[in-house]
Structure formats: structure tokens, C-alpha cells
Image: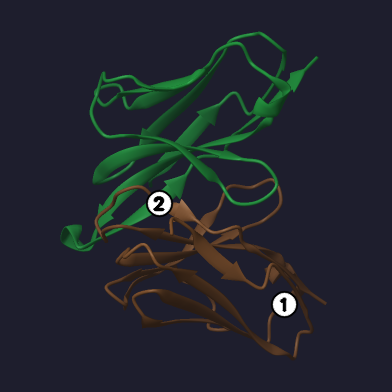
Amino acid sequence: EDKVVQSPLSLVVHEGDTVTLNCSYEVTNFRSLLWYKQEKKAPTFLFMLTSSGIEKKSGRLSSILDKKELFSILNITATQTGDSAIYLCAVIQSINTGTASKLTFGTGTRLQVTL
Amino acid sequence: DTEVTQTPKHLVMGMTNKKSLKCEQHMGHRAMYWYKQKAKKPPELMFVYSYEKLSINESVPSRFSPECPNSSLLNLHLHALQPEDSALYLCASSPFPWGGGYTFGSGTRLTVV
């Protein structure tokens, strides 16, 4: 059975802290791993990772994928209250002999940044 | 245009009603998806359309009926829903059926009474 597992489930930190969110996966026909931030409505795209060991950065956020150990991490440095959200990891799986794909989400990590 | 637009944003319907959710994108994406998200849970896949053809139906009850009239438009027809179908319904699209970055719409919050 395909699994995408995130840890921790919930995290409370102080503004300015650095956090690391984890995502491990066991899926068939892996193509890519995505990170999303979800506040009240739709998930907003953060990163897409396809190759192992290449760090992607956007401001205070960075992420890396390890395809050998089947996991990814999302780092947020100098956290701000605006970073409070649910962070979702999702895996793109190829299906129907590669003619289609589907996105399977992890359980999410709820991050709360306090003053 | 880099958005996926969903209408309506909110919908309240009775168990005997028929309603439709609409999703539109003009990014030239060739795959479109419906997801259902219950409170405090991650989105769950319902349907996948690739090149306007249904590729995946994740064993969704027949009271949900998807339709893809053209490459920019995706509908979800609702009939005889149950209160437990109340959820946030998210539409997404991706450039290619085999992957690429998924873009999500802002969702329709559905309440079945």
C-alpha cells in the first residue's frame, strides 16, 4: 500500500527559531515529491523535487530529497508568525503505464509560530 | 493566467438537490483533478482526467459525477449527497498527464444539510 508519512504531526516554535519538517514515502512508480503550504483554503505550491541531493531554496525555505532513503525535509529558518500553517508533502506517482499521474498527500505537519 | 478558478466558493445543498461545481484553467494544462478534503485531513484524490478523458476514479460513489467538456473546464455534478459528503472540494491541474507542478484552485466548501 502506498504511504506518505510526515513528522512531526504538530509543532509549536517561537519566532526566529529554525524548524525541520520530515516526509518519508513508500510508493510505487515515484516521479516527484512536492511541498505545499496550506492555510485556510487551497494548498499553495512551495517546491517540487525530482532529483536526489539537490537543495531547492526560496527565501527562508529550503528542501532536499533523498531517493535512496525515501525521504525529504523542509527547512524553515528565522520563522515568522506568517509561517503558521499546515505543511503538506505529496508524491507524484506515475499510473496507467505512465500516461497519467496522481498526487498522494501525507498527513501534514501543523506548524504554529508564536511571538 | 496562472490560476485555477473554482466556483462557487461556498455551497449549501439539501440531500435531494442536484448541483454542480465548476473548475476552469487557462494555462494549457492537459490533466485536471478533483480532490476532497475533510477537516484536519489531507486532500484525497477523487478523479483524474488526462487529455479530457477519465483516467482514474478512486472508487467514488456514483452520486458524484465528473465531466470534462474541454481541456480548460472540469465539472463535478452532485446528486443525492449525504451530510458526510460535506467537505472542501479542490480542483487541480498539471501541465502534463504524467506529472509536473500541480496548481490548486481555492476550493468549494460544500455543506450538505
Residue drawn at x 55%, y 53% is B43
Which hue belongs to chain B?
brown
How is colour applied across the structure in the image?
by chain
Q: Residue furthest front?
A: B1
Q: What is the x, y in percent for residue A50?
A: 26, 34
- In the figure, is residue B66 to the left or right of A78? left
Work out which quarter of the rendered image holds the C terminus of chain B and state it.
bottom right
Q: Is residue B4 above or below residue A28?
A: below
Residue drawn at 69 percent across, 28 percent down: A82
Q: Could you confirm whether marks 1 and 2 are on the same chain?
A: yes
The x, y position of residue A24, in whole percent, is 42, 29
User: Which mark identifies residue B82?
Assistant: 1
Is B86 placed above or below A75 here?
A: below
CA–CA distance between discs 1 and 2?
29 Å
Disc 1 packing (10 Å; few <14; some 14–19; many ≥20): some
Amino acid carrying mark 1 in the image: Gln
Per the image, label 1 sits on a secondary structure element best described as loop
Q: Is residue A90 left or right of residue A78?
A: left
Q: Where on the picture, by quarter, is residue B74? A: bottom left
- Residue at x 53% of width, y 44% of height: A44
Q: Colour of chain A?
A: green
The label nearer to you, 1 versus 2, is: 2
Q: Which residue is the site of mark 2?
A: B102
Q: Secondary structure at mark 2?
A: loop
Quadrant of the image occupied by residue B21: bottom right
In the image shown, does B110 or A40 lie closer to the viewer?
A40
Kind of residue at disc 2: Tyr
How crowded is the residue under tag 2: few (<14 C-alpha within 10 Å), some, or many (20+)? many
